[in-house]
Image: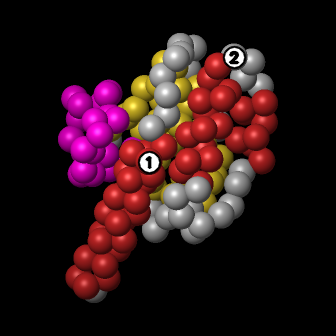
């Protein structure tokens, strides 16, 4: 598991409830699989990947947003996705003050994203 020090700085700079929520999201994602990599991309966006992008997260003024790159293709039996339905690829989880992070359901989404990425890799290799 690789952590980006810039994400530590980002969280340290948040002075309200979003810091705890962001930390919980981060720890849940990183705790799902030891091969997940955390990176700092696009001038200030935490990104988690394994065999391809899993999700990005940002602390906005009134929420913490976690966007799954291929969320539309992932099973979401606990209905965590509550934003991003207008497109056919990404899906997001908007967490507001007072919301609890459903860690088991978030881990299930992360595992599904990893499986999706690995399946995509296998299909691309078989085409060559």
Mark 2 crowd level (few <14, some 14–19, many ≥20, 10 Å Cα): few
Quarter of the image that includes the C terminus: bottom left
Secondary-structure class at tag 2: loop
Q: Position of residue 119 (x, y in %)?
A: 30, 71
Q: Is residue 42 visible in the rendered structure shown here?
A: no
- Rendered image: mark on residue 104: 1
Q: Residue at x 63, y 52 (%)?
A: 39
The residue positioned 66% from the left and 29% from the top of the image is: 20
The dominant secondary structure in magenta is loop
- Judging depth in this view, the residue of 16 and 9 nearest the camera is 16
Magenta span contains residue 25: no
User: Which mark is nearer the camera, 1 or 2?
Assistant: 1
Q: Is residue 21 above or below residue 127?
A: above
Please rate how many residues cluster around mark 1, counting C-alpha atoms within 10 Å: few if below 14, some from 14 to 19, many from 20. few
* Above or below: residue 102 compared with residue 61: below
Q: Is residue 41 left or right of residue 102?
A: right
Residue located 69% across and 16% down the image: 16
Q: Does 72 lie within the magenta span?
A: yes
Q: Name the foreground residue: 77 vs 36.
A: 77
Quarter that holds the N terminus? bottom right
Q: Is residue 49 visible?
A: yes
Q: Secondary structure at mark 1?
A: helix
**Quarter-wise, where is residue 12 in the image?**
top right
Q: Is residue 79 left or right of residue 66?
A: left
Residue 69, image x and y in percent? 38, 47
Judging by the rendered image, the residue that carries numbered circle 2 is 16
Of the numbered discs 1 and 2, the one sitting upstream in the chain is 2
Horizontal and vertical percent position of residue 90: 32, 41
Residue 125, percent from left and from top: 31, 82
Query: What range is drawn magenta here?
Result: 68-88
Residue 7: which quarter of the image?
top right
Q: Which of 121 and 115 lies nearest the eye of the viewer?
A: 115
């Amino acid at each position: 598991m690789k952590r980006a020090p810039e994400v530590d700085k980002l969280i340290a700079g948040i002075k309200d409830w979003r810091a705890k929520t962001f930390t919980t999201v981060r720890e849940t994602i990183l705790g799902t699989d030891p091969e997940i990599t955390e990176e700092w991309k696009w001038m200030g966006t935490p990104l988690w990947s394994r065999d391809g992008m899993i999700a990005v997260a940002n602390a906005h003024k009134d929420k913490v947003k976690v966007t799954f790159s291929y969320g539309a293709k992932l099973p979401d039996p606990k209905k965590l996705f509550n934003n991003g339905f207008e497109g056919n690829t990404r899906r997001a989880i908007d967490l507001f003050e007072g919301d609890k992070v459903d860690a088991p359901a978030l881990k299930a989404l992360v595992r599904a994203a990893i499986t999706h990425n690995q399946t995509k890799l296998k299909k691309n290799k078989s085409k060559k």
